[in-house]
Image: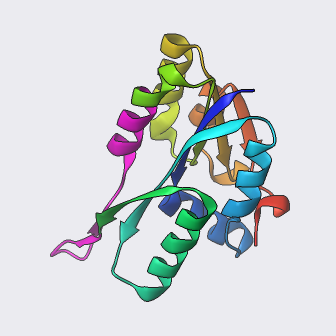
Amino acid sequence: MDKIAVFADVQNIYYTTREMFARQFNYRALWQRVSASGEIVSATAYAIDRGDGQQQKFQSALRHIGFEVKLKPFIQRADGSAKGDWDVGIAIDVLDIAPAVDRVVLLSGDGDFDLLMRKVISASGVVAEVYGVPQLTAQALISSASVFNPIDETLLL
């Protein structure tokens, strides 16, 4: 049975599923799908913390499913722009665990992760799967993955 590590770029998945489908992603359905083909030995969801009650409820639901939730504070800059991405944190965690698993599953459409997927495939020999909204996932990320799984109706609430 494959050992699987799951990494969820919560902000990216939230915005892409909202933009494309006007619906939310179903993390429980994802968990069921992934665990049907192996053992999830690690699952981490990376999110931004705005201190909002609805977000805290969502984060609690993720923990209940089995995810470790890592939070960064939301930073509003003086010019009105916002900061708060987890790209480096996700990359470090993926590189750390890749030698100990058979499959890495990344939920994100962010093209910045294409180099990461290529690296874990070549250095650790893992299967690198990506789940993303096809129309909003960078082609470079799709091409770099061993397997691309399109987010569709079956993975939405």
Q: Where is residue 141, by image quadrant? A: top right
Query: For the view shown, which residue lies furthest in the bottom direction?
Result: 53
Query: For the view shown, which residue lies furthest in the right direction?
Result: 154
| In-image side of 111 versus 131 (left or right) | left
Q: Where is residue 147, by image quadrant? A: top right
Residue 59: x and y, percent?
A: 49, 71
Residue 134: x and y, percent?
A: 72, 49
Residue 15 appears anywhere in the view: no
Residue 47: x and y, percent?
A: 42, 62
**Residue 67, above or below 5:** below
Give the residue displayed 63% in from the left and 62% down from the top: 65
**Residue 152, above or below 144:** below
Viewer-side residue, 84 vs 6: 6
Give the residue displayed 64% in from the left and 30% down from the top: 3
Q: Is residue 82 magenta?
A: yes
Residue 97: x and y, percent?
A: 46, 29
Q: Is residue 56 magenta?
A: no
Give the residue displayed 47% in from the left and 78% down from the top: 55
Residue 52 appears anywhere in the view: yes
Range shown magenta:
74-95
